Image (tube, rainbow, N blue to C red):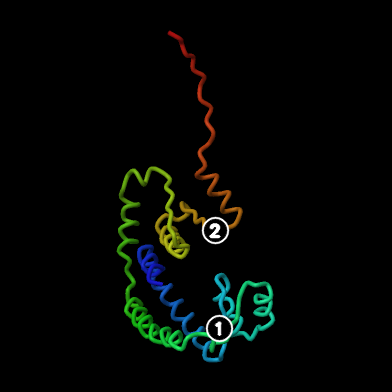
Amino acid sequence: MKILLVKRLESSFYAFKNTIGRFIHSYEQFLGEFDKGKVYVSKKYAGKIFDLLENDDEEVIQRLLDDDKAKVYEAKDFKEEFAAHLKSDLPLLRGIYKQWSNIERDPKMGAFLAELSANPILKRYKIIIFTESKETAEHLFSHLQEKFSGQTLLFTGSSSTLVREQVIENFDAPERVLPKTTSASL
């Protein structure tokens, strides 16, 4: 958790705040189910399982369990201190979230947008920006769209084929035919 939070903070204030919020929500949901005697575990579908539990969609949950995409355990199979640790983390996460919820200005974002606007080299060429966090990419894209409307593309792993084709069209170097040269032997 610590490493993920540091990575999110390095990525953007926006991603950090959202990650803290998701942690709080997940902890609350997890502890609620733990108190009911069940622990659902899934690498890919944990958030979806909690949504399904909230909507009493047991059929879909059962399908995830049957397809081995999730597992369910009895809460009593876990050490007593497991839930106690989660419960003690929750107020800390809430405190961090409260402190960060008042922060609206992201100095990295401001400096980056200013550099893009002022640097003549960056203004002259197309650039590609990579980020580890999809959330940061989407946040950055919204700011770039405000400042450079119609001049930006966002591509993530969930982007459509059309967007992928636009990226290739805009950034794939065209094949150039080099003139034939003659070489002389000495």
The residue labelled by disc 1 is: 39
Q: Is residue 3 left or right of residue 35?
A: left
Q: Is residue 114 above or below residue 79?
A: above
Of the numbered discs 1 and 2, the one sitting upstream in the chain is 1
Q: Are marks 1 and 2 in contact (CB under 8 Å)?
A: no
Identify which amino acid the numbered label 2 is placed on: Gly
Point out which mark residue 157 bears. 2
Locate the C terminus by quadrant: top left
Residue 102: image location, x then y, percent: 33, 77
Q: Residue at x 46, y 51 (%)?
A: 151
Graded by Cα atoms within 10 Å as few (under 14), some (14 to 19) or many (20 or more), the crowding at tag 1 reads some
What distance separates the C-alpha of mark 1 from that of mark 2?
A: 30 Å
- Amino acid type of the residue tagged 1 in the rendering: Val
At a point 32% along the width and 61% down the height, the residue shown is 108
Q: Secondary structure at mark 1?
A: strand
Q: Where does residue 152 sit, x and y in percent of width and height?
A: 46, 53
Q: Quadrant of residue 50?
A: bottom right
